[in-house]
Structure formats: structure tokens, C-alpha cells
Amino acid sequence: MPRNCLVINLDRCTGCDSCIVSCKLENSLPLGIFYNRVIQVGPTGQYPNIERYNLPVQCQQCTHARCVEVCPTGASYRDEKTNIVLIDASKCIGCQYCLYACPYGVRSFDKDEGVVKKCTLCQHLTAKGKEKPACVHNCPGGARFYGDLDDPNSDVSRELAKYPDECIHTLGAPEGEEPLTRYILSPKYATWKELV
Amino acid sequence: MGDMKSVALWRRKSLSKLSHAASGLAGLELAEKPALVEADEEFATSGVKLEKHHTCCHGCYNNCPVWVYTEDGVAVKIEGDYDGTLTKGALCTKALNQLHLVYSPRHILHPMKRIGVRGGNEWETISWDEALNLAGEQMALATKKYGPYSIMVGAGGGGTYGNVFQRVTQDAIGAPVCISGGGCQCYLPADCAGQWMRGGSNNRHEGNNAREMWNAWNPAMECVVLWGAQTSASGAAYAARANADMRERGVKTIVVDPYFTEEAAKADIWLPIRPMADIAMLLGWFRYIIANKLYDEQFCKYWTNYPFLIDPDTRLPIKAEEVWPDYVNPSADPNDVYDTPAYVCFDARTNSIQPFPYTLPENSPVDPVVFCEAEVNGRMCKTGGQIQWEACQEWTLEKTAEVTWVDADTIERAVRLYATTLSGIGTGQFADMSELSSNFIFGTMALDMLCGKVDKPGVVLTEQKPESRHTTRPTHFWCGRPYQETFGVGWTVGLTKNENLRRSKAAVERWNEKGVDGLAKQKEFVAYQMARLGSDHHKAVHQWQLNELAPVRKALLVGEPYKISVRWEQSGNKYCVMSSGEEWNKAYSTIDFCIHQQPHMTSTTFEDADLFLPTQEWLEFEHATEMTTQFNQTYMRKQVVHLGETIDPFILVTQMVDKLCEKLGGDDKVLCRDFQFNGTYRTKEDIYPQWAEMFGVDDWAEAVKHSEDHTLTVPIDELYQFYQYLDIVDDGLPAGFATLSRKCEPYVTMAVMNGHTGFPYNFPYEQTGPQGEWLEYDAVCTYREQSENMLQDDKEYPFYLTTGRVAHYHHTTLRNAPYSRELMPVPDVRINPRDAKRLGINHGEWVELSSRRGKTRGRAYLTEGVRPGVVMMERFYFPESYDGSQKNPTGGWRQCNVNLMARDDVVNPTFASASWRGYRVNVVKSEKPEGVWTEPEEFKPFMPDHNVECNTQEVFHHA
């Protein structure tokens, strides 16, 4: 099964929020609902001895997705074909257990529709393998990559291959979630901070 | 639109439709469907017409290429073009948000006339005929009553499509007063410096200069200095992308910035400079490089004017003939057309002063000494290099560190890296918005020249594209408009005085032949030029036909030296981008009639406008030349949609002048009616053939219908052109540079001459100082501080204010884009946590800032990215303040407007640059101001409205 996910190169990210707006327009998200956010980590230290980086965060496509485990209706599920975590809005009862279970805060509750929403890796664009998610396509820094971690020729694998292990990070996994999203951050720019 | 007399709030769309829009309308629903990929098949059978259009963004000046998807003519998606040489598909929030701006319920689609009092915010829709009649009548009335100087034009970036159409409109009607929040405060100084110092482009990142750092094809650059340049904010897509690629290639960066910008965070060396201490830092670099002989001596000797001996009285380089009257200049043009002067230097071979003719270095009869003084005609004269050396001599590393607040070791590491690598300085606009504008741009350009970082691989100061190579001695006129050909006014640098005079006389003669008194017309033009307010003190304002700001305000208030009656505002929101808002508000109230043209209403419309003329958003606007080039590509800017009766501003200004002439009784009643066509056109049909030819298509209107990419691309191998100054041209000499001396001029002779007589703008006439005197502008980088600076002990205003760019907004645009506002609803006041703690301010709390001139509010953003004692804030205004839902509607420019504290009472002597940054402030805890939306849901009234008159015809057609 493929392990499709995003890889985000923080050495290239400028924190411009284009990924947020691309995503919102592509997915027609209402005001106040976000599939992704960009967190500024730092500056840490004291001026001028400081460092910082931008951390875009969206559904991490966990191998052990707690959101799927806690969903009482099967609305949060792992798609058999693509192996990615999705939400079937028709089954969602809006209980929001998944919001509590997700350690990354990347799910939003749409009050108007009464359902939970999250990043789909732009399945409507990517399913046939031709297009990239909107946030990846439009990323100003060229910092975002999409593809299968297990395919050595995928965009994500090729980008990761450029960097030594010390530059490659994942968000913390308090319950052993094993998030797929990889972040690249070179120590010469900033030290990776464990935030979760 | 039937009910002509209805009172309209912005647009006659009901609130129910707005809320419908907010919940997602037809076009955008497409994307919600499970798969756009399936859309192709679905659309093929559904009868919905799906099209793809190639065009380019105009959310700022960078023109990123895009693909726009339409569904039955409604734009539903914008995405970056993978074929953009630098962007590679990238798009920033400004570009993406166009979908919300073009369909914004605030995008005005019909001309509107104010009813009731100014500020009452009541409007009625009128026809274009009525609008033009009204505007024409009012302008004609003012002209008859007070003369053409009484019509004032407002220019500026952000929402406008360039400045050329404004300038030629002024020229046509002879209206000298034009002001801009930018201009003297943005890019004009760099434009002058590029032309004056090397006869070409400058070192600004904006404006398609400084491109060698992005040369991924034949990379040579080892290091770039980003001096006050937030490239990833000002060029949020293309520059961010290219910079990331550049860093990945291993190009080192030195970032000089008081704020810990994106660039600073990724810099190899960051110089966390005291805000506005840049001139001290530059002088520290000059001294270190000269004292340690890190400069390029050969280049300085033969390709700069540093070795020329300077007359201590005139401050001009001495010409050989002034010392040796019988001297025969071997490089002079026997036809007396092209100018190649010989100067005077101190020759190391003969240990004496000698004539220094222009030759290839190997053919030079002299070995000029760069830094020295020598006796010439009985007076001790210094070389240009010596004058720069004396200006920097005291700036040891220790002193530079003491004054700039950056430690000496870091400065030394930076300057050594810069001086010992293939590198160059790329600058941002920051210093233009200060009293230091000339000192900074002259200094940064001159440093690169001192180090020989000119016109070769791996440096910033290069001139690109094949057409920049020369076959004759390069010449330069300060703009592309034919003032010399039409009025016989202005000096072409590189031509002799006699040739300039011949051209002037020929122009006068051409008028005479047409039966018009040519000399009188020339004098009328020169009088119009010199009537620009403040231009007697700050003569470089002529570069962009601007005026010093404060004297314009005074003229409005007191009617001196002449009455200004009509204001024709063609920029977005002057209240947001300029200082002294309250004073301007009073001054503008004296205006008899105010016309505002923009795609959206702003504070300016609310406060001042009597007539609002709706112009096009960029998805509605087509053009072939204006804002269509990025790097090596020129895009066909296509009209993808057209709403209501919005109009192309180029056509609008032409139609307005037509109407003015009609009301005045003929084209001969204005200064030069046809001059306007050096940039504008009456209808699309008039200009299409030119555009079609440029893009090599038979028919423009046909071409834009196809989903074809018509981009014109300069091959990379042809784009990068080096060592152009060494090309041997038709006089047998190396081409050199399009400057007075044919060499780089780090000693800025043009600045001296400009101060004396207004040269080159009014030749053969002279504009001296207010008392007929010569004014003396700096010719080299000279130490200056802002009048209010951080070295002062100021108990009343203990903080120092600086500003910076954000990626989300350009100038005053996009404050009505809901997806930007929910991310950045109000301006942050960035303040150090240690200062905030002392003042009891928490992150996200409201604060009030005040200066000696005004006060405003913002939301505290605590960050170690700013130095203690410094605050940083971005300009802002709130279009929601005059939303129909507000109990007390206002213009929205007082609540959080950093520029209310700024100043234009002290300005840069050369460029009249006011200070939009770099002054003392105080900070106290405060409350949220009224009429400001901060929560995402509040922005629903700004969400797009697709239920409008889509894809209507252009208003004006060929007769």
C-alpha cells in the first residue's frame, strides 16, 4: 500500500501562508475553517542571538490514526484504495471525539454543516496521479512535496534523499501515532523543537 | 441596472445575496465536488463550458504567471504556471485572493456620484456619459477659473496599473501637481542612482534588477548582501522561490536588517543593525575595504570617476580643457554628437597632474591615482575617491560597531565575505522612505563599484538582455517619453552640449512648422515643469514628475503659490500610505471637486470623493506591455472576465482628457493633447494591432480567446550579458557606460549638477534654488542620521519605530480580501517581550503608539525578533469601517494607521523623501478600536458575489 503524504522543507518555507489560502480556495472552506496552519516557532533565545523557523501543520496521515480509532461511526476512516485517512461527511455525527484524539489540532468542526473536516491531500486532484495538492502546486518557497514515501522516485522521496538524517524530523507522537509527514530542517538554520 | 436614482451602498446587491455568496456560490462549488479530475468528463457531458486562460498576476509589481480556470465564463480557480522561469508554479496569497477581489461585493461596477455630504457615504449610480461630462465640466471650470495647475493628480502603486498613464496625462493637460505615497519614498532614488551612476539599472530587488543571484544556469555568484530587503515578502512567490533555490545552490547571504526577517533567519551572517544606522554601517564597510586594499584598483582607476580631480568650488570633475585650454581630446567625436570628455587626474608615472582621456585601460597615457589630492590651477583638489575616503575615514570597525550596535567581529566577517567573493549588494526600499534615501543608494551602488562588482558574472550590477549591448557610445534619457523630441527640453546623457542644443532647436522648429510658436510652447512646458511644488529645493522629483508632499498640502490649504481646485486621485488610499493624515484630511476638504478611480472604494472615496469611477481588477485588465514582464518572460495579460462597466484606466484617462478638451473648446486649449498617446489609448481597438504585433499574433482579440500560452521568452543564454562596457563600438573605443564620463560614477556628478541647475530635466533652461542659488547635494555616501534617531535620549518617546513588509498585502490592497484578513486582521505591533513585560503588555493585547505628530493603535506581537527599544508595525486601513452594518461608519484610516505618526516635514535634500519609518514613539496599553473586524466570521460581507453582470462588453469602442 502506498504511504502518500506531504514532505515539507522548512529550509525553503517563508511562512507566507499561501498554502492556507490555496487550500481554502481549492476546498471552498468557510471563514474560520482551516485544513492547515503555519506556526512560527520562535524566535527562541535573546535578540540578536536567536533562531526561528516556520512550521506548516496539517493532517499528518498517521500510521496509527487515533482519529480513526475513536470515531464511533466510521466517518473517519482509512481509504482502502489510497491508504489515506479521510472523513466520510455523510457518516459524521459531529461528536468531535476525533478533534480530541488528534494530537496535532488539524481537524476543524464546521458548525454550519455539523461535521468535522480536514485535509484530504486534495484527493479530487491527486487521485489519478496527475496533479498535486493545491498547497504543493502553489507553494512560493517550493517547500512542499507530495507523494509516496515508499516510492523512491516520488517527489517526497527525492527531496528527502537530498538531506542527511539529522535534517529530517517528524512531529512528536505521544501515543505512537507514527505520523507520515516528514519535515526537513537543517541545523544551520535552526534547531528542531519538540512541540507535541 | 435600471433604477438610476437608488441610493447604493457599494453595489446594488441585496444582503441576502451576500450571505448566499458567503456560503459558497456556483463557481466555487465546483471545487467541493469530489474530484476536479473527474470534472473534465463531467463537464464534457454537462454542457458547462470549462476553459483555461494564461495571464499574469497584478497583486504587486512582480507579474507572476498564472493559469485561470473559468466555468461558463466565471473564474473559479487560479493556479501558478509551472513554466514560470523563477516561480515554477508558485503563487502567493495576493494572487490567489484575486478570485475574491474581482467578485468582491466591494468591487464597484458602475460610475457613482456622491449625494449628500462628503463622508456621508451615500452614492447614486450614474452612466459613464454622465460621469465623464461631470468630470470634464469640473476640470474645465477649474482650468478656466484658475488655470491648468489647479488640477491635481494622485498617483501611486497598489491597485493602479503603473504610472506612465498618469504622467502623460499630466503632460497633456499641463497639470504639474502629482503626489505619490511611493515615488520619492519608493524607488525614485534608486531609479536616479542607477541612471546617474552607471547609466542603467540599479541594485533594487524590486524592478527586475539584481538578477544574477538567481542565475541557476551558469551560477557564478558566491555571496549576496540583502540590505534591508525582505525579498520573500516583497516578492512573496517568485523571489521566495528563487531565493530558496539560490540558498540551496550554496550562495551565501549577508542580511543587514534590524528585524529578524525570513532572510535574516536563514542568513549566513546577519547584521542586526540599529534601525536607520545604515549609513554608518556603509561607511564602516567603505573604510575597511579601502584601508585593507580590498577594492578593485584597476576597475577604480579606469572604469570609475574616482580618480578624477574635483573642483573644490563647483564640486564637479575638472575637464582637461579647463587646465590646458589647447588640449586636444583624442577621444572626442569629430562630429560633435557623442560626448566623451577628458578629465584631469594625478598620474603616478609622471608624478604630476595630467589629462585623462577616455581609452581602453591598456591604451591609457596615464596611471591615475585613485585616492589623492593635487594642485590644479592654484587650488588643492581632491579626487572623487579621496572625497569618499575622507567621508569614511573615521569609521573604524570599533566606531562603526559603537554607532550601529552590531559587534565589530560580525561586521568584519561580513565585509570580508562581501569583499573577497563574487558578490554584490541588493537593496530593499526601506531607506527611500527616510531622510537617508540618497546617502543609502549612492553608498550601496558605490561600494559595488569600488570593488569592481560591475557587469560581470557573479555580481548584482549587471545590465541584461541582448538589446542592452551597444554599437555606439551609450546614451541615456531619464525616461522613455519624448520630452526632448516634443518640447526640446531635457539633456540626453552621452550627447554633447551642441547636439543637445541642436535637438532642442529642432523640436521648437517642428512646432513652428505646424503654425504654433515653438519657443512659447517650450517655455509653457518648462514653466509647467518648474511649477512642481518643492522642485526648487529637491530637483530630482522631476525624475518621476512628482512634488514634495508638504508644499502641496500647504498649497491646498492657503492657495499659494496657486489654487488647487480639482483632485483626480488615481491611487488606492493615500490616507494609509502617507503621513499627516489629519492635515491632509483638512487640506483635501478645500478641494472643489474630487474624482477617485479605483476598482474598490477606500478611505479616500469615503472621505473625499465626489465622483467614483470604477477601474478593472487584474482578471478584467488586458495589456501587452504594462506590468507583463517577469525575469526573462513577457506574458500576454488577458482579460479573463469583465464585470459590469469597469474600465481600463488607460482608456479612462484618455476619455477624460478628450472630455476636458471638448469642454474647453478644443485640443489646443491644453498643453499638448497628443502627448498622452505616449502611453495611453482611446479604445482597445486602437491599441490591439500594436499588441498583436508584439506577440506575433494576427489578431489580439482572437488570440486571447484561446487557452494558449503566448508567453515571449528571452533564452537564458541571451538574457545574461556581461562585459558590455568592453565592447568596442563605432568610435573605436570601448562602449563604456551611459553616464557623463562614460564610466561608472560613484562620485555622483549628476547629483551635484542636479542640485545646481536642475540638470538634466529642464535643459536648456535652469532651475536654481528658491533665491536663484545653487543647491549642494551630496555626491558621495556621507554620514547622516534620521532627525529623530535612537542615539538620542528621549524620555517622552522612548521607543523607535520601524516598519517592514508582510507577504499578505501590497500597499493598500487586499484589506477587503476575507481569506487574508482572517489570517492577518489587524496590524501587529512587534515588540520585544522584555519591553512588553515592563509595560504590562501581553501577546495579542491592544496598544497605543504615539509620536510627536500623531497616534494610532495596533495589536502587540511579542517577539525576540526585534531589539529592545524598537517597535515595528505594518500600515493598514479597515474597509469594514464603512460597511453598512457599522453604527458609526468612518473612513477606517485612523484606528491602526502607523503613518499617522510618520513625517514629511524633514525630507532628503535630493529626492524629497519623507520618513515613513525611523522616528521616536511611545507605547502604552490600550483597547481595541471601534469599527474593526478581527474574527473570521466577521468578514462574511467581504466574501465573493458571483451573482453579478459577468462578462459584459467594454464601455468604450472605436467610433
Image (cartoon, coloured by chain):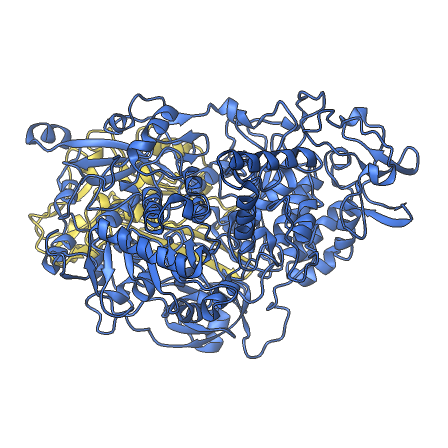
Chain colours: A yellow, B blue
In the picture, measured across the screen, residue B951 lies left or right of residue B259, that is left
Instruction: Residue A169: tell me if it is visible.
Output: no
Q: Is residue B761 above or below residue B42?
A: below
**Percent x, y of residue A18:** 33, 46
- Residue at the (50%, 30%) spot, across then down: B216
- Residue at the (61%, 49%) spot, across then down: B441
Pick whichever, B85 or B560, lies toward us: B560
Count of numbered labels shown in the rendering: 0
Farthest front residue in view? B515
Q: Is residue B220 above or below residue B776?
A: above
Pick whichever, B162 or B22, lies toward us: B162
Pick whichever, B131 or A52, lies toward us: B131
Q: In this view, does B312 lie above or below B367?
A: below
Instruction: Residue A71: tell me if it is visible.
Output: yes
**Percent x, y of residue A31:** 21, 56
Pick whichever, B437 or B918, lies toward us: B437
- Residue at the (71%, 36%) spot, across then down: B741
Q: In this view, does A106 lie above or below B485?
A: below
**Percent x, y of residue B625:** 40, 34
**Percent x, y of residue B786:** 61, 64
Farthest bottom residue in view? B796
Which quarter of the image is occupied by the C terminus of chain B? top left
In the picture, measured across the screen, residue A14 lies left or right of residue B221, that is left
Quadrant in the rendering for residue B730: top right
